[in-house]
């Protein structure tokens, strides 16, 4: 009997070939059907929250417009996290197998562990969406389908800018479905990277402060003569070892002689001088602004400071400021474009948002400077570029 079976297998008849072919087709169809059913069954919200650690993001999502809205259209978990078709769909399903591994490991099985990993998980999703041009968002939202004319002015301007520059949804819509993580760690790492790059670069004729720095009237001074605010432009006059002799220039308003501003009529903080230092400043011819009647005077001051926390050009500083501004503000709303307000208006705008922000006092100062130098009435000059 075994010999007959073996012989049949070695030299199958046409009927046997047909049986094998039919069996193969049936097996393939059943297998594909089983895989398809399995993949689809893992795409429901019910399946996604079957692991108890997913209860936290689900509760956050249930409070958003993607879950409950006037139109009654609901975006499920997979609508946002899994592309609809093709290789990106299969890749997302394969990648999701790591969730089972971490479930068994208990990586985020308590609220405390979840919060500890929230930032890294969010960054992973954001980076992926940056790479694929927010593919899952665009399965529902496309520029071609938008009626820009009926959108609010800020949204319309943002969407038009994104179309022109290749911006993607996640640039402005972080926190759209889940609570934003504590971004302070990410902001701190970005600043450390900025400072490291600046330390390795050679300074040219100008330098720009990265944060608030004390300055002195002599080399190696011990008692500060005042403070320079972040993103202040300095003209380098002399280099002595680890110290720089520089000139800081700007404007001061009559009656507020101890403060140097970035432009006449605009309260863009550049430097604050101690009272004895005020007399050391060189002043120019006073100007009266016709709109306000205020008197403003050009002023400059030669000072010394250690050669540290200084960047050779302003653009990396603005890039960092733009990043933390967009990331921080997008937790509540789409961040306003810098030219949405006048330079002086930005002061009140940021002041009103202080209790909602994750920025430190120093970061807030830099963001304000960035917004003012890119405001609707931004002053011209090197620092504004």
Image: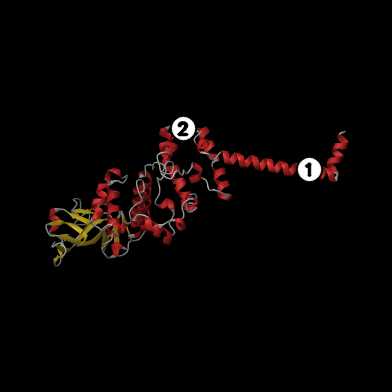
Residue 48 horizontal/vertical position (percent)? 51, 37
Looking at the rendered image, the quarter that the C terminus falls into is: bottom left
Dot 1 falls on a residue whose secondary structure is helix
Please indicate whether residue 77 sits to the left or right of residue 277 in the image. right
Number of callouts in the render? 2
For label 1, count other residues whose C-alpha is less than 10 Å away and answer few (under 14), some (14-19) or many (20+): few
Residue 231 visible in the displayed image: no
Residue 42 horizontal/vertical position (percent)? 55, 39
Q: Nearer the viewer, residue 331 or 219?
A: 331
| x 49%, y 49%: residue | 136
| x 46%, y 56%: residue | 145
Residue 261 horizontal/vertical position (percent)? 20, 59
> Of all residues shown, which one is farthest toward the bottom?
285
Q: Which mark is residue 20?
A: 1
Q: Which mark is residue 325?
A: none
Q: Which mark is residue 109?
A: 2
Colour convention of the picture: secondary structure
Dot 2 falls on a residue whose secondary structure is loop
Q: Nearer the viewer, residue 186 or 87?
A: 87
Residue 179 horizontal/vertical position (percent)? 39, 41
For label 2, count other residues whose C-alpha is less than 10 Å away and answer few (under 14), some (14-19) or many (20+): some
Q: CA distance from mark 2 to mark 1?
A: 49 Å
């Amino acid at each position: 009997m075994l010999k007959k079976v073996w012989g049949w297998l070695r030299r199958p008849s046409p009927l046997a070939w047909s049986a094998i072919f039919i069996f193969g087709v049936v097996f393939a169809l059943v297998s594909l059907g089983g895989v398809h059913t399995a993949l689809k069954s893992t795409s429901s919200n019910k399946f996604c929250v079957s692991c108890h650690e997913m209860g936290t993001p689900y509760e956050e999502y249930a409070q958003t417009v993607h879950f409950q809205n006037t139109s009654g259209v609901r975006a499920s978990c997979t609508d946002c996290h899994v592309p609809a078709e093709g290789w990106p769909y299969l890749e997302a399903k394969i990648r999701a197998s790591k969730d089972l591994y971490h479930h068994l490991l208990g990586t985020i099985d308590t609220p405390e562990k979840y919060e500890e990993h929230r930032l890294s998980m969010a960054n992973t999703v954001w980076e992926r969406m940056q790479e694929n041009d927010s593919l899952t968002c665009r399965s529902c939202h496309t520029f071609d389908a938008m009626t820009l004319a009926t959108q609010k002015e800020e949204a319309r301007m943002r969407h038009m800018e994104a179309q022109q520059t290749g911006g993607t949804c996640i640039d402005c819509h972080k926190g759209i479905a889940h609570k934003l993580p504590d971004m302070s760690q990410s902001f701190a790492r970005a600043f450390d990277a900025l400072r490291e790059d600046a330390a390795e670069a050679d300074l040219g004729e100008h330098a720009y402060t990265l944060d608030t720095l004390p300055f002195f009237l002599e080399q190696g001074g011990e008692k500060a003569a005042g403070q320079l605010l972040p993103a202040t432009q300095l003209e380098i006059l002399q280099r002595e070892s680890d110290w720089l002799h520089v000139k800081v220039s700007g404007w001061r308003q009559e009656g507020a002689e101890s403060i140097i501003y970035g432009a006449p009529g605009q309260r863009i903080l550049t430097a604050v001088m101690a009272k004895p230092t005020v007399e050391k400043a060189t002043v120019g011819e006073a100007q009266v602004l016709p709109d306000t009647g205020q008197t403003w005077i050009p002023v400059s001051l030669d000072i010394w400071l250690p050669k540290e926390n200084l960047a050779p050009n302003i653009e990396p500083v603005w890039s960092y400021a733009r990043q933390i501004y967009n990331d921080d503000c997008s937790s509540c709303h789409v961040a306003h474009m810098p030219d949405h307000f006048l330079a002086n208006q930005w002061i009140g705008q940021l002041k009103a948002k202080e209790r909602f922000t994750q920025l430190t006092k120093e970061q807030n100062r830099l963001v304000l400077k960035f917004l003012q130098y890119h405001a609707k009435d931004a002053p011209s000059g090197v620092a504004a570029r």
